[in-house]
Amino acid sequence: MSEHILELPAHEAARRMREGAIAVPDYAEAIQAQVAVAEELTGALAYFDPAHLAAQAERAQDGHRRGAPQGALHGLPVAVSDIFDTQDLPTGDGTRLHEGRTPRADAMAVALLRSAGALVLGKTRVSELGIGAAPETRNPGRPDVAPGFGSPGAAAAVAAGMAPLGLGSQTESGVIGPASRCGIHGFKPSHGTISRRGMLLLSDDLDQPGVFARHIADIALIAGALGGFDPDDAATRPVARAPLFEVAMSEPPLPPRLAFVPTPYWERLGETSRAAIEELVEALEGQIERLDLPAGCAEAERLLGLLAETDAALALAGEPAEGLSPALAARLARGRSHGAFDYARARRFAASLAPALDEAFFAYEAFLAPASAGPEGEGAEDAAFSAIWTLCGLPCVTLPLLQDERGRPIGVQLIGARGNDARLLRTARWLATRSFD
Amino acid sequence: MSEHILELPAHEAARRMREGAIAVPDYAEAIQAQVAVAEELTGALAYFDPAHLAAQAERAQDGHRRGAPQGALHGLPVAVSDIFDTQDLPTGDGTRLHEGRTPRADAMAVALLRSAGALVLGKTRVSELGIGAAPETRNPGRPDVAPGFGSPGAAAAVAAGMAPLGLGSQTESGVIGPASRCGIHGFKPSHGTISRRGMLLLSDDLDQPGVFARHIADIALIAGALGGFDPDDAATRPVARAPLFEVAMSEPPLPPRLAFVPTPYWERLGETSRAAIEELVEALEGQIERLDLPAGCAEAERLLGLLAETDAALALAGEPAEGLSPALAARLARGRSHGAFDYARARRFAASLAPALDEAFFAYEAFLAPASAGPEGEGAEDAAFSAIWTLCGLPCVTLPLLQDERGRPIGVQLIGARGNDARLLRTARWLATRSFD
């Protein structure tokens, strides 16, 4: 029974819980059993309390019994990266410096998850202070592929079936990188879609929350619950939004046209990754064209690092140096050494490239590009494959469509027009459900 | 006759021109006569063609004859700083490098002036490339007080009666400084109020167009014609705006409460300026309280210079070094030498101070502060007195309420809550029309 319900897509499980066909405590119990099995292998969790999960499930079931309104995420436990404040669980930010910190309020994204009926599974491991050393989390399917930097705990937890959904954050490649490495779906919406209030803040220009799921429809489900205006986060906007789940589940009005964008970092991919992606591009013949980015884009990785390190050095200036890993201390020291002229140039690069790319999205529904350095590459190299999109704040989703000869996952990234996240997810679902023969 | 009509406030002159009591060509002719008298003294104009002004006046009069709709600025010549593109006049940006440059389109601000019925008087002198050496413009009333940096030509032209209205720009203190030195009103609206499309761009964070007039009501008149959303300037917002002129002309519902904010730069003012401002504060007893800013504000001048120099170095990177004045070359060299950490800190300082000041504007209608280094101080020191407000993007207006014992003007600056420009101008008009005995 427990195995069965965990195999349901999250939107289907939530529907059955709303309809009473599955009791929320039963679903939570199945999750708990899976955590008991998988956590030792993955080390995904920074904080987990079975009683706390059970209590949330009971409350949700109580509400159901009383006929209270049920949200789109009713009864679904979410793996929450440990840089999002939670009022009922400690939030340690991936550093012993913040161990046992107990925030007074939920981060906006966590509050929105709860409003939609979700439970908080627990807190999942993140890079030290979001940007330093990777945690000791292992990739459940492939212990030989490290899950990378940023929010690897949430990605590993979702990949291991410990939660149907996850919440993470991308300052460099923290969502797309781990999702791609763990062989699941990861989605970083347009900059300013999800409020960052109550999240560990590193860079106003770069920090972008994102989500994880094993099914593309579930990506749309959780992301749809998270977008919205927050007067406390100036990057968010009070604008109307397309219903993400409904649009993502609909058929494209015309067969989508894609651009294959190898990016200036293509040659740094392993041979197997390149071959696999090239094969996919061939299979899409007639619907895909190669698009080369302006030459300046080769600088994106360097400029992203420069902005991230400088902003993080400022954001973390109050942290005692003796509590930092040598790797993070070195990054923050670099963050204090960059030049303002280069910093301003990096910001202008991002601001001017984004509108230039808008043009391309009149011709193409989405760009198709590598999602990470792949199973042959190091997690530290993932940033190159997210750099352009993170800098420009474009929505990106990674799909676990490919594998190498050893069965290790190779993510395929789709990138959409800024602000048109719904269209991107519709295209992603179209690609994910297409059969290639 | 000509003397008489130039003494009218601009809004009154425009009204009479709309009603047919004054012919636009007659007004333009009076202006032209005044230019002939005053330009030799002031050197305010970078480009002026009497025939071009006369032709615009004839066209306006033709429209009037045909019963075409007339705008709020009907028939009023505006002194336009020579960093705003004009499609029918060269735009030289205060440098011989751009001499004779003929833009294809009007800057958005210039287009809006024309839409409101204004004529372009001509182009007025600006600092070299907006941020370098001051032009050889002299202060018409007081040849012993240099009109300062930024848009001194427009300020001097308005002070000399060569135009009833002026358009300028403030990256450091370019509107408030010259207005205060020339003994007229200057107004820099909230950041993002007036579009900067077609203006020489130095710094997205700092550049803020502003206006000049001899009467506070005329400040509201011209500023009211200039605010609005422009999809090409991401700092502007599609929001509803209070009718600036109507609100500015109305009585405050309650006697305004002011905060006297000496700023951390108070001691750098000359003794006479300090004494004059202190006397004004005393005359306002019961309606004004002293407010000291957070200690960090003492850094504002340095941080403003750091941002302005860095951004300008990037914006002007394409200008050949041999065409720059030694002063500007030195500024741009400094702009390439600042640290990114300090740059990011300066931006964060501005972003965090603005909301902190919002609180104070619940208690006070406006802050009262020095407008510039005063007649005893150098123009180069004016930036200190605008630094905090320019950094935070707050609306500021300078009023020519005071003089030193030699009759030299001492500006009084009022600063308002970001976005509430109408309330600031209403308070300014209240203060300007109050009699102190």
Image: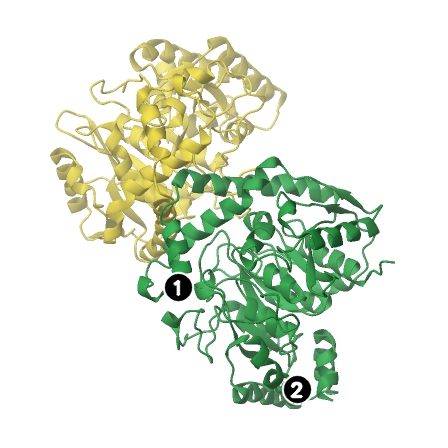
Chain colours: A yellow, B green
Label 2's element?
helix
Q: Chain of mark 1?
A: B
The quadrant in which residue B75 appears is bottom right
x and y, in percent, of residue B360 in the image:
70, 41
Label 1's element?
loop
Label 2 vs 1, first from the N-terminus: 2
x and y, in percent, of residue B435 in the image:
85, 61
Q: Is residue B406 left or right of residue A80?
A: right
Work out whether A418 lies above or below B48. Answer: above
Q: Chain of mark 2?
A: B
Circle number at residue B30: 2
Q: Is residue B116 visible?
A: yes
Q: Are marks 2 and 1 in contact (CB under 8 Å)?
A: no
- Mark 2 nearby-residue class (10 Å; few <14, some 14–19, many ≥20): many
Q: Is residue A228 visible?
A: no
The quadrant of the picture occupied by the C terminus of chain A is top left
Q: Residue at x 47, y 42 (%)?
A: A192
x and y, in percent, of residue A65 in the image:
60, 19
The quadrant of the picture occupied by the N terminus of chain A is top left
- Mark 1 nearby-residue class (10 Å; few <14, some 14–19, many ≥20): some
Work out whether B350 lies above or below B31. Answer: above
Between A379 and A36, which is closer to the camera in this rendering?
A: A379
Between B303 and B61, which is closer to the camera in this rendering?
A: B303
Q: Which residue is mark 1?
A: B325
Residue at mark 2 to residue at mark 1: CA–CA distance:
37 Å
x and y, in percent, of residue B362 in the image:
72, 42
Q: Is residue B360 left or right of residue A401?
A: right
